[in-house]
Amino acid sequence: MYRSILYCLIIVITASACGVKRFLPAGERLYRGATIQVEKEKNVKASSKSLRKQLKLAAKPAANNFALGQPYKVWWWFVIGQPKRENGVRAFFRNKLGAPPILSSKVNAAVTATNMQAFLENLGYFHSVIKGDTINKGYMTTALYKAHVFPQYTIKNISWINDGSDLVRLLQEEQRRGILQAGNGYRLSDLQAERDRLDLYIKTMGYYHFNPGYIMAYADSTIGNNEVNIFLSVKNSIPEHARHPYTINRIMVFPNYTLLLPPPDTSKTGTFNVDGLLLRDTVRKFNPVLFKNVITYRPGKIYSSRDQNTTLNRLINLGTFKYAKNRFEQAKEGSDPYRLNVFYYLTPAKKKSLQAEIDGFAKESRFFGTQLSVNWRNRNAFKGAELLSVKAYGGAEISFSDSFRNVSNFRLGTEVSVTLPSFYVPFLKKKETNLYPPRTRLLLGYEYFIKQNFYTKNVYRLQYEFAWKESSNKEHTLSPLALTYIKPGNLTDTFTKETTLNPSLISNVYTELILGSVYSFTYNTANPFEKKQWYFKGSLDLAGNIAGILSGAKQPRQKELLGTPFAQYVKADIDLRYKRKLRNNFDWASRLLIGIGHPYNNSGILPFSKQYVVGGASSLRGFQMRRIGPGSYLPTLNEQRLYQIIGGDYKFQLNSEIRMPLVAKLSGVVFIDMGNIWTKDTLLFGKAGQLKKDFYKELAVTSGLGIRFDAGIVLLRADLGIPFRKPYLPEGQRMVISKFELGDAEWRKQNLVLHIALGYPF
């Protein structure tokens, strides 16, 4: 197979080498790219490599892609030919597989050399000289640029031409904290960025009509010693109204705005005053307190673009309004001309909606099933942008595996939740003006779970949760009350007999109360186009600690709360991800998961819903879920059938993969995974599953290949994993990387694990 692929690749490359020349127009050659030679003066600090890399950005046009020295995409372009229809099959393959040729007639080396020289001057390399020429070889043309680079000029002093105005004083004070600093290398881009930054700042100080074009910058490069003096000033021609700060005169809100019948927005008719805001809500659709909390400034305050953006963002993020926009105009009434009237136009979204969904799924635990859910939503339930959601669902899961036949799972449930656009704490009011409105969520849920031929469970949930964003890339979630009550029933004779053979199975049907609090913090790189991307999520889950102290619990299930044994544990999780963009659109992505659960006193093990698992499409891809861990333990088929999950109290997992583009919307991946789970004690899986000092000897290692298809709405993924290290084998025999037997059908059945899933694994 591999030889066939190699032969096809050689044939394509050979054909492209022979075929492109005959397709080129008469007198034309194919542009091969640019070669840049750098000659530096002795005081130039930048390396030749970095200079070539920067100059490459200004070398136009960009050449076609080559493989083994041949323009394979250009060959495809010509071979597929001109399509008859723009949206036809031929056009699709021509655009996806091929690329139009970059011809020599598009290359003007002399003009490009001039542009490259100007590019260097903008970076402060004054007096540098670049000459360009072309070299023809066969049917290809190469551009050759020779750059003679002089030292980069540095900034000696930065001075403002002060006219004594408050405007210049504010600009001067802020500039001292900015991008331009004495001793830095001169860059035109820094000057432009500093003008934009100063404009953003001055607009937070009331200068509504100011813009960056009013700031002038001069560079004096004649002072010698490769230094420049920078002079900044405000233009003399700046309009008078741009020299003065503005205050807010009036704020009017139209919460039922429509383009069909827009109300007169300059008249106070029909409005009422709430905390300095004029609302025109004639149908009383909204509680005025909503706008009192969401709008962050009031009349009499200095205009600030930060307040403006914050308020608009908060209104949009309420989820109640389909459109939100604002308008500022200079106030005409009164003697002070430097005042602004503000108008907010809010178009409500559809208040109520009913949605039904039917899903089909395949679980990594080898169950297939379907679920029907009906969700009713009210986006303004109590006239304060509250989201009321009522959900009912039912589902079934079955398995066609022999060992899992007649072990189907069925569930019926309902959830009612209310989400409030503020911090809601009884008897306590907190005024906040963050960019994103906080949310308080109250949830009440119930589920009836049936494990066929074994038992049933009644699961009750109550959750009181706060969520708020510190910024666009930092988010906090706090659940001071997270209550789960589990009451099993209808134990069958079959399950009872199994528990006599394996008493630890009884832990699956414990009646238990989980009374806890959960906090999590999430951070990600704000700019999605950064070369290095970071994601971090840390969480802390505490349950039963106060109850344990008050009751004096010392042994598992010794004490009760409301007549039910309560869980007592501390649980901390870390999810750290790193993604780095490599050359040629390759990406390197990695993830580290660390989970530590410590059940104690009233709990011998973590509740099953809180335990860690490994294996499957987003974990150790060389193993199926339920077939690895904890520790060196290998779960039996009977345990896989009867245990709710095969889990542990501790987890370590490391994933890393290289993602590479293939063709069109297809991409490939090479991955390696490592990790395992462990238990605190020997209650469920004996000593083999318990965490030990030499736990690293029980790490599983897998590797493999994958392919992804980006369908736009969803990403389809298939990963083929192979175990390299099996921790459940005897010590000294766990490394199985040298025992590959691809020709053996039984080996393939035991070691080739295919996962099909949606979305990236991390």
Image: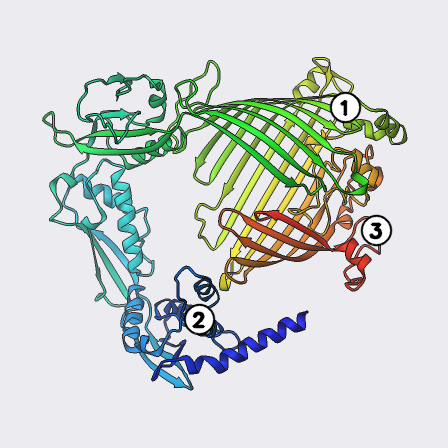
* Element class at badge 1: loop
Q: Is residue 258 above or below residue 654?
A: above
* Element class at badge 2: helix
Residue type marked 1? Tyr
- Structural distance between the alpha carbons of marks 3 and 2: 51 Å
Q: Point out the tag, 3 or 2, that comes first from the N-terminus.
A: 2
- Residue 247 image point, x, y percent: 20, 30
Q: Residue furthest left?
A: 335
> The N terminus is located in which quarter?
bottom right
* Element class at badge 3: loop
Q: Point out the tag, 2 or 1, that comes first from the N-terminus.
A: 2
Q: Point out the tag, 1 or 3, that comes first from the N-terminus.
A: 1
- Residue 282 image point, x, y percent: 27, 17
Instruction: Check contact, mark 3 vs mark 2: CB within 8 A.
Output: no
- Structural distance between the alpha carbons of marks 2 and 1: 67 Å
Q: Is residue 574 above or below residue 128?
A: above
Say which residue label 1 marks. Answer: 510
- Residue 351 image point, x, y percent: 40, 25
Residue type marked 2? Lys
What residue is at 64 percent from the left and 27 percent from the top? Answer: 542
Q: Residues within 10 Å of mark 2 (few under 14, many from 20)?
A: few
Q: Please give the label number shown on residue 49.
A: 2
Residue type marked 3? Leu
Q: Residue furthest right?
A: 501
- Residue 99 image point, x, y percent: 43, 69
Say which residue label 3 marks. Answer: 729
Q: Residues within 10 Å of mark 1 (few under 14, many from 20)?
A: some
Q: Nearer the viewer, mark 2 or mark 1?
A: 1
Instruction: Check contact, mark 2 vs mark 1: CB within 8 A.
Output: no
Along the viewing direction, whichever of 466 and 253 lies nearer the viewer:
253
